[in-house]
Amino acid sequence: MAYLVARELRKSYGAHEVVAGIDLELRPGECFGLLGPNGAGKTTTLRLCLGLTDPDGGTISMFDLPVPESAREARARVGVVPQIDNLDPDFTVRENLMVYGRYFGLSVAEIDARIPTLLDFAGLTNRAGDKINALSGGMKRRLTLARALINDPDLIFLDEPTTGLDPQARHLIWQRLRQLAAQGKTIFLTTHFMDEAERLCHRLAIMDHGRIMASGTPRELVAAHIEPQVVEVFGDSAAAWAADQGGALCERCEQTGETVFCYARDVDPLLHNLEQRPDLRYLHRPANLEDVFLRLTGRDLRD
């Protein structure tokens, strides 16, 4: 049984189709990632699946309940971490958890029993009495994640959960998400960070202009859409080198600024050539999910 199924999902705002007939399916116990540049339709897709926005076409079911018709009942088994923290600054850490738990109809005794475990999970046991404004950005994000677990959900939606966090806070959030996955929770994650998706997601889909461009495991996507080896060449003369020699030594070259990205299956001739060019700097690495993402969605800046 799939926890969430969307078929031919569509949503337009005026003449702009934000979600253009996509299919999604989330299986119990997996972390599913939805990747895409700004404006790709990720957040709208999450809102449609949660029943917060009505679709223009297609069908959605969550826990075998139709959405949006029975969204309220389905959301009783769901936790949500929004893109922007919406904690109540007038309440303490503990009070934020208490008030949120009451929205799910939990008794004060039930919430009291759950709060110590959630505070420990968030690393906020010693900050239970603090007001929200006294917390760092990382602490607020961890509290928002803990709050999403107050109803012991089976399915957790996370909309860019680590945006704006420093590396230490990001790694701690990743550790907590791995713990949830190990407990059998199902996670629906949107993110801009390719390393985050590669570390956490069992399966993922890359979305652009409202459409699913590709889907599969991270390894499957890299194998299907990109050459296995990448050499990044830097320097003022990199573009001239690529036009004169480099392009003939690899399957494909792309240039961004002063960097030339060379994609190849056999990089030995390319590396041998570069060793003779002290005016150029280069980095040799295996292909990764970011290479796939950029090939499918382009390198142009999105606002």
Image (tube, helix red, strand yellow):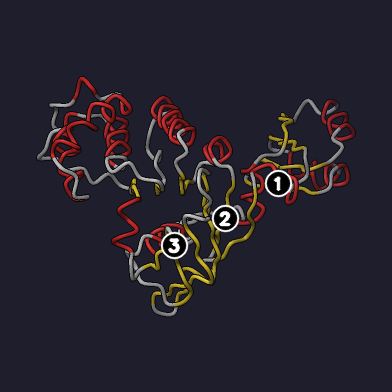
The answer to the question of whether label 3 and label 1 lie on touching residues, with beta carbons closer than 8 A, is no
The label nearer to you, 2 versus 3, is: 3
Amino acid type at circle 1 is: Glu
Residue drawn at x 49%, y 32% as measured from the top left: 182
User: Based on the displayed image, in which of its 4 quarters is residue 213 positioned?
Assistant: bottom right
Farthest-out residue, left: 90
Amino acid type at circle 3 is: Asp
Labelled disc at residue 220: 1
Residue drawn at x 74%, y 38% as measured from the top left: 230
User: Based on the displayed image, in which of its 4 quarters is residue 53 positioned?
Assistant: bottom left
**Residue closer to the observer: 157 or 207:** 157
**Is 254 placed left or right of 99 in the picture?**
right
**Is 265 placed left or right of 55 in the picture?**
right
Q: Is residue 169 above or below residue 196?
A: above
Residue drawn at x 69%, y 35% as measured from the top left: 234
Labelled disc at residue 300: 2
Dot 2, crowdedness within 10 Å: few (<14), some or many (≥20)? few
Q: Give the mark, 2 or 3, whose residue is nearer the N terminus.
A: 3
The label nearer to you, 3 versus 1, is: 3
User: Based on the displayed image, in which of its 4 quarters is residue 134 positioned?
Assistant: top left
Farthest-out residue, top: 126
According to the picture, the residue beneath numbered tag 3 turns out to be: 64
Dot 1, crowdedness within 10 Å: few (<14), some or many (≥20)? few
- In the rendered image, the quadrant that contains the C terminus is bottom left
Q: Is residue 174 above or below residue 289?
A: above
The answer to the question of whether label 1 and label 2 lie on touching residues, with beta carbons closer than 8 A, is no
How far apart marks 1 and 2 lie (CA) works out to: 25 Å
- Mark 3 secondary-structure assignment: loop
**Residue closer to the observer: 293 or 43:** 43
Q: Is residue 53 above or below residue 93?
A: below
Spot occupied by residue 32 in the image (x, y as percentages of width and height) = 52, 48
